[in-house]
Amino acid sequence: MRAEVMPDFPSVSFFLVDYVTGSVTNSRAAQLANGYVDIETLVDADQAVFNLYQASMGTTIVINSVGNVVMMNEDYKDGVKLTETLQALP
């Protein structure tokens, strides 16, 4: 996604949500250790987002500029569905 999709949408904000590490400090350490320094990481320490969307690792959610969920792609594979959804955003 970082190499194939994100560069084509410079005006779209992309975030990584970490629901595993449990704290901002641990999440930042994991982010740095795994080379995710170029994407903003949000920490879901109490798993509120995880529970709301019943999300798991690899879940891709597109939220439009007014806050509506327009796509939830449980199985990110090749970026085709994500690209089509991003192209359709106003």
Image: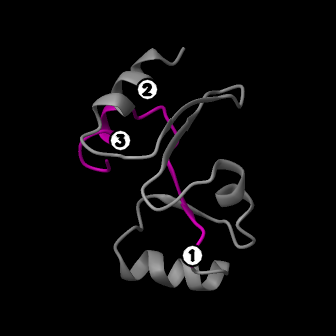
Give the quarter of the image for residue 21. Answer: bottom right
Picture layout, residue 41 above or below residue 15: below
Crowd tier of the residue under label 1, counting other residues whose Cα lies within 10 Å: few below 14, some 14–19, many 20 or above: some
For the residue pair 43 and 73, the one nearer the viewer reads as: 73
Crowd tier of the residue under label 2, counting other residues whose Cα lies within 10 Å: few below 14, some 14–19, many 20 or above: some
Give coordinates of residue 46: x percent, y percent. 75, 71
Identity of the residue drawn at 60% across and 69% down: 19
- Which residue type carries mark 1? Val
Determine whether label 3 and label 1 are within 8 Å by CB: no
Nearer to us of marks 2 and 1 is 1
The circle drawn on residue 20 is 1
Residue extent of the magenta highlight: 1-20
Task: Give the farthest residue toward the front.
Answer: 54
Picture layout, residue 80 above or below residue 88: below
Give coordinates of residue 67: x percent, y percent. 71, 31
Picture layout, residue 12 above or below residue 51: above
Identity of the residue drawn at 35% across and 29% down: 81
For the residue pair 24 and 84, the one nearer the viewer reads as: 84
